[in-house]
Image (cartoon, helix red, strand yellow):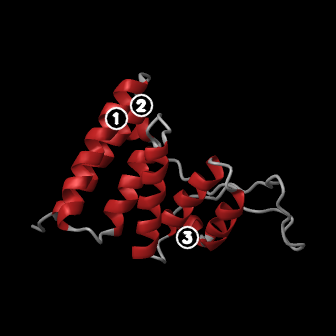
Amino acid sequence: MMQTSLSESAIAEANRLSLEAICQDDETVQSRLLAEARSVLDNALGSEPNNPNLHHMLGLCWYDDPERSDKIRQAIEFHFKTAKQLAPSAPFPSLYLGHFYFDEGRYVEALPLFQQVDESYFEDIGQMPACREISPPGFTFPAPAASIPRSLRISRAPCRRLAR
C-alpha cells in the first residue's frame, strides 16, 4: 500500500473543506471553513514550501472566500503566481491567476495568462473551454484575434461531489 504524503493529505482535506464551504449559503460559515482549509495547507507548506500544488490550493481557498479585502487579493495573487513559477507548464495556476486578474478588471494581465493555457489539455480531460469575446476598456486586441478565450472555467461541480 502506498503511503500518502503530508501535502497530498493536506490538499485532500483542504479540498473537502473548500467544497463544503462553497455549498454553504452562509458566508460566515464559508469563510470559517475556508480559513480551516488554509490552516491545513499552511501547516503542510511549512514542510514543503516549494510545492506548487499546495500554493495552488491555497490560492483557490483564498479565491473562493466571499470576502475580498486587500489582504485576500494579495494572498490570491501570491499563491497563484508562486504555483505558476514552481510549475510553469501546469495549466491551472495560469488559468486561475488569469481569472483573478479578469475578476479584478486587470484584463491586460489576464489575457496573456489565458493564451498560455493549452485548450487541448481541457479537451483531453473532457472539459471543453468556454470562449467568448471580451473587450476590456482601453485595450485593443491584435488584428487576428476575432475572439479571445475569456473563460476556460472548469466546473468543480462541488455539491454533486459532496453528495457521493
The residue shown at (41%, 67%) is 83
Residues tagged 2 and 3 counted as in contact (Cβ below 8 A) = no
- In depth, the one of 119 and 86 nearer the eye is 86
Numbered label attached to residue 23 = 2
Q: In front of the other: label 3 or label 1?
A: 1
Query: Percent position (x, y) of residue 27?
Result: 42, 26
Spatial CA distance of label 2 from label 3 is: 28 Å
The residue shown at (66%, 55%) is 151
For the C terminus, which image quadrant?
top left
- In depth, the one of 145 and 157 nearer the eye is 145
Numbered label attached to residue 121 = 3
The residue shown at (30%, 39%) is 35
In the displayed structure, would residue 145 be above or below residue 17?
Answer: below
Query: Percent position (x, y) of residue 150?
Result: 70, 56
Element on which disc 2 rests: loop
Q: Residues within 10 Å of mark 2 (few under 14, many from 20)?
A: some
Query: Percent position (x, y) of residue 70?
Result: 49, 44
Query: Which residue is denoted by mark 1 in the rendering?
Result: 20
Element on which disc 1 rests: helix
- Whether residue 95 is visible to the viewer of this picture, yes or no, is yes
Residues tagged 3 and 1 counted as in contact (Cβ below 8 A) = no
The residue shown at (54%, 59%) is 97
